[in-house]
Image: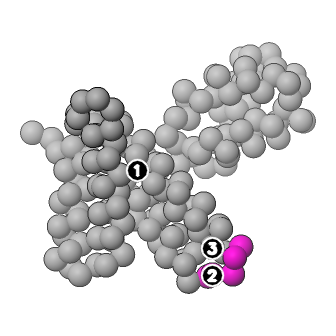
Amino acid sequence: MTTTLKQRLHDDLTQAIRGRDELRSATLRLTLTAITKEEVAGTTARTLSDDEVLKVITREAKKRREAAEAFAQGGRAESAERERAEGEVLAEYLPKQLGDDELAAIVREAIAESGADSPRAMGAVMKIVNPKVAGLAEGGRVAAEVKRQLAG
């Protein structure tokens, strides 16, 4: 039987606790809590699929990134560093993100496919790009690249 992503998180948490890895255990604990919250949200409790667990991890990683930026701007380098470190722990569970060149190529193809020729056509391009990059690139990054290419 293959282990689910949630099971892997649990197993890794146990390892982190045994290894006294405070950063890793705290990060995994918070993530598992977020997954459990998601499972009991709504009218009936359910078990999340790996894809749904990935969405939760992606959301948690994004929170860490945003918090790190906020702390850095607020001059709280230590807190920013902690958030970045937690984000790196979570990144290990996410699919490898697309590089800038790969993303640019996908956006170029989508622009050609949609026949878009101005920034007003951004929505049409995003409709084609989003399914191709789901989970592999952050929405803000994708939108910025589409804007950049459409602005020419």
Does label 1 or label 2 sit earlier along the sequence?
Answer: 1
Residue underneath mark 3: 71
Q: Nearer the viewer, residue 10 or 39?
A: 39
Q: CA distance from mark 1 to mark 3?
A: 21 Å
Residue underneath mark 2: 76
Q: Which mark is residue 98?
A: none
Is 6 drawn above or below residue 63 in the view shown?
above
Q: Name the residue rendered at 47%, 72% in the picture.
A: 85
Q: Which percent across, then down, holds residue 58?
A: 46, 48
Circles 3 and 2, Cβ within 8 Å, touching? The answer is yes
Residue 76 sits in which quadrant? Answer: bottom right
Q: Magenta: predominant secondary structure element?
A: loop
Residue underneath mark 1: 57
Q: Which percent across, then down, holds residue 39?
A: 28, 40
Q: Amino acid at mark 1?
A: Ile
Q: Which percent across, then down, holds residue 97?
A: 53, 49
Please give the range of residues in magenta.
73-77
Q: Residues within 10 Å of mark 2 (few under 14, many from 20)?
A: few
